Structure formats: structure tokens, C-alpha cells
Image: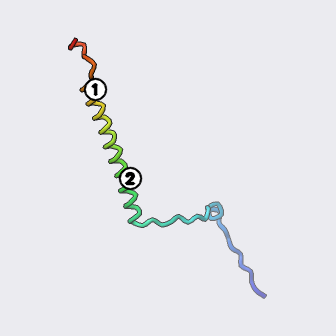
Amino acid sequence: MSKKTIKVIKKEQRNRPETAQPATGPRETAREMVKTVTNWVNEFQQKRRTETADAVKSLLSESPRPSEI
């Protein structure tokens, strides 16, 4: 006659999904950080270019100023 074993499932284990997250190594983490910083730098440079272009347009406008009439 064989003995039957009973597996005890705790409440925390029952409600927790059994999804395994892929392990990210140091290379992947470093790549993500570099990608994030690169995006920040690109956004900052684009914003600066836009502001500079607007400033040049306002300085070199063709309309006469009230003091020049």
C-alpha cells in the first residue's frame, strides 16, 4: 500500500501568478541607460535648435518697428 502525499499551497502562492521574468544582464541594463540618456540629449538639442531658429526669425523680421517709421 502506497502513501499519498498532500501538497500544501499557501495563500500567497495561490494568488501569485507563475510568470517568470527574463533576467536582464548588466549589458542590457547599460544599453537601456545609454538609450535613455541619448534620447534626452537628442530632445534637448532639438528644443535648443527650435528656440534658436525662433530667436533668429524674430531678430531678422521684415516688418518695420514703430521707432523706424
**Image height of 68 relative to 36, above or below:** above
Observer-nearest residue: 68 or 52? 68
Label 1 secondary element: helix
Image quadrant containing the C terminus: top left
Q: Position of residue 18 (x, y in %)?
A: 61, 65
Q: Is residue 14 above or below residue 53?
A: below
The structure residue drawn at horizontal position 24% and vertical position 16%, both measured from the top left corner, is 65
Q: Residue at x 24, y 26 (%)?
A: 60
**Farthest left residue in view:** 68
- The residue pinned by badge 2 equals 36
> Sequence-wise, which precedes: disc 1 or disc 2?
2
In this picture, is 2 found above or below 46?
A: below
> For residue 29, which quarter of the picture?
bottom left
Q: What residue would you read off at disc 1?
A: 58
Please tell me which residue is depicted at 66% across the width and 68% down the height of the picture.
9
User: What whole-number distance in Å separates the C-alpha atoms at marks 1 and 2?
Assistant: 33 Å
Q: Position of residue 6 (x, y in %)?
A: 71, 75
Q: Which mark is residue 37?
A: none
Task: Give the crowd class for mark 1: few <14, some 14-19, many >=20 residues within 10 Å.
Answer: few
Between circles 1 and 2, the one closer to the viewer is 1
Q: In the visual, does 45 lie left or right of 26?
A: left
* Quadrant in the picture for the N terminus: bottom right
Q: Amino acid at mark 1?
A: Ser
**Snapshot quadrant of residue 25:** bottom left
Identified at 35% across, 47% down, the residue is 40
Residue type at mark 2: give it. Thr
